[in-house]
Amino acid sequence: MTEQRTVWWEDGRVRMIDQTRLPAETVILDLRTDAEVAEAITSMRVRGAPAIGVAAALGLALAAQAAAAEPRDRFQERLAAAAERLRRTRPTAVNLFWAIDRLLRLASDEPEPAAAAERLTAEARAMVEEDVRVNQAMGRHGAELLPAQGGILTHCNTGSLATVGFGTALGVVRAAVAAGKALHVFVDETRPRLQGMKLTAWELQRDGIPATVITDNMAGWVMRQGRVQAVIVGADRIAANGDTANKIGTYGLAVLARSHQIPFFVAAPLSTIDFALLDGSAIPIEERSPDEVTHVGGVRVAPEGVDVFNPAFDVTPAELISAIVTEVGVAQPPTRDTLARLAKQTDR
Amino acid sequence: MTEQRTVWWEDGRVRMIDQTRLPAETVILDLRTDAEVAEAITSMRVRGAPAIGVAAALGLALAAQAAAAEPRDRFQERLAAAAERLRRTRPTAVNLFWAIDRLLRLASDEPEPAAAAERLTAEARAMVEEDVRVNQAMGRHGAELLPAQGGILTHCNTGSLATVGFGTALGVVRAAVAAGKALHVFVDETRPRLQGMKLTAWELQRDGIPATVITDNMAGWVMRQGRVQAVIVGADRIAANGDTANKIGTYGLAVLARSHQIPFFVAAPLSTIDFALLDGSAIPIEERSPDEVTHVGGVRVAPEGVDVFNPAFDVTPAELISAIVTEVGVAQPPTRDTLARLAKQTDR
């Protein structure tokens, strides 16, 4: 299941699946500059917090390689410019900033540009491998939370395509199924960009995991019918207290799950937790183009000139979250203390 | 606002706006047989519980006119066949059955086919006018429930296009705005068929009422931000105890409204109340083609072969509904008693 990577380094270039073309066709992009990587992130050819973190890291490695023959000042300047460009792509997912900062720290430790470029590239490539290991660990911890059988509702795409491989929330589902649990996944189509219907349904189909696509507004009704035993989603940024920014619609699902006494789980690597933020109110929420709502497949479906609100994310308060699953363990319930304790288990 | 009718009788034919072509173009259909009317209902060229009730009545009038020269037995036989064909179009909206039964009762009172056809046609045409009057009365009663200013969230289309004219829930919003209330409407796009984005946004735009389209999964987040002061929706069938079947997603909205302590209103004519049903559990819920979910504008967006659940409606329990607005008054809260009292105020 982890064979096909979403984003990787190959022969001095960044390669990735163009997710805007799925499920109709599998197109592999071949990116040679940090600007090309930045464009791929902005236009969501690669998406999902962990995947864009790794993509940004690889993009920065491209910039470092391109500047490796420059004098030190010029090298640092070009690296800083590339970092800035990559940071400006998308504001909400903290993994992006975390990955860039991690590489910049490394580069500043190494005075010689060619050596710095090599270290930085090696580290970015290590992050590719690390992401898959982290997700598999998350899968092991999270699988225990899911029931032996029943319906699992998920939102957006948190699978291989949202990461380098295996996935976060969908990785937990994969691990649970691999452990013998008989699960049926309800997949929210996830408007406006339909990542659930286009990407999650496609991944589950390839894995042979039973799944049913629903429109987002059916989630409550499916819960009411007793067909959902747990909800599990990913995260784009988690504040120190557990408040979680994730794909728009997540908050509503969490409220619905609470009303139906269904456990609501978040699965995300520690790199998604922003310990600098006390709570979710300070998480920047990206607003994207109204065209994402008014047009489907390039065709306008809304009346001309209509006003649209299109926040890409919302924030779910920690008190609606039963547990947050990370690669080092589970914060259940998520609080400032349980999350801080998890963070101490790693040398990050 | 009530000038353009959605469905009407003209020169012995049934005319209606083809709603599947909106908002791109306004196409007026010209239907000459009950079979053509039945097709228009099934394929949702006309939709909305009150509008399909009136359309079915006019369709039955076409059948009666076509059979007016037949002997009595044959006339009754053809009328019964047309009624059966129209009844089979869509199962959930009770207005359809109510309208057909009302006309069949009339026809059975009149032994002479030509006279019966005339009476039936006159009654069907009266129902066209009656629908607009009923909606305007509903508007007056409901307008008082809405705040003097603030955000109103609505779902699907309950406007002129869901009725002959003016609308049910959207009619209440229109009446409130006409009475000087400063309202901003949040319009759920309403997947899968996008009646909110395509039809409600179009109607509000034409009326100059401020409106913002959101995807269905944004409703909870907009509520959380304090931007919604009331939710108002229509209904396809209301059981005697107030349980309400309406467009899929309504139940989830009602749960979200309750969690945010936002009043949740239903506006529907008395003809939508099915006093034969004790509660909502017996309301038949139409499941429509998976293609409505997997295809947008005729183009497949989902992977081939994916499983889809596509109920067209859900049932909101009465305890989540603050009030039901009808043409004769408001049931607040809706209960077996308050609804029965309203029914007594009319000679239906």
Image (cartoon, coloured by chain):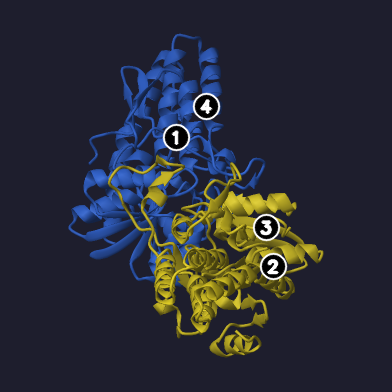
Chain colours: A blue, B yellow
From where the camera sits, is residue A300 visible? yes
> Of tags 4 and 2, which is closer to the observer?
2
Tell me which chain the residue with mark 1 is part of. Answer: A
Q: Which residue is mark 3?
A: B185
Q: Residue at x 71, y 74 (%)?
A: B137
Label 1 SS: helix
Q: Which residue is mark 1?
A: A99
> Of tags 2 and 1, which is closer to the observer?
2
Say above or below: B85 vs A26.
Answer: below
> Of tags 1 and 3, which is closer to the observer?
3
Q: Residue at x 64, y 71 (%)?
A: B126
Q: Which residue is mark 4?
A: A83
Q: Amino acid at mark 2?
A: Val
Q: Amino acid at mark 4?
A: Ala
Label 2 vs 3, first from the N-terminus: 2
Label 4 SS: helix
Which quarter shows the N terminus of chain A?
A: top left
Tell me which chain the residue with mark 4 is part of. Answer: A
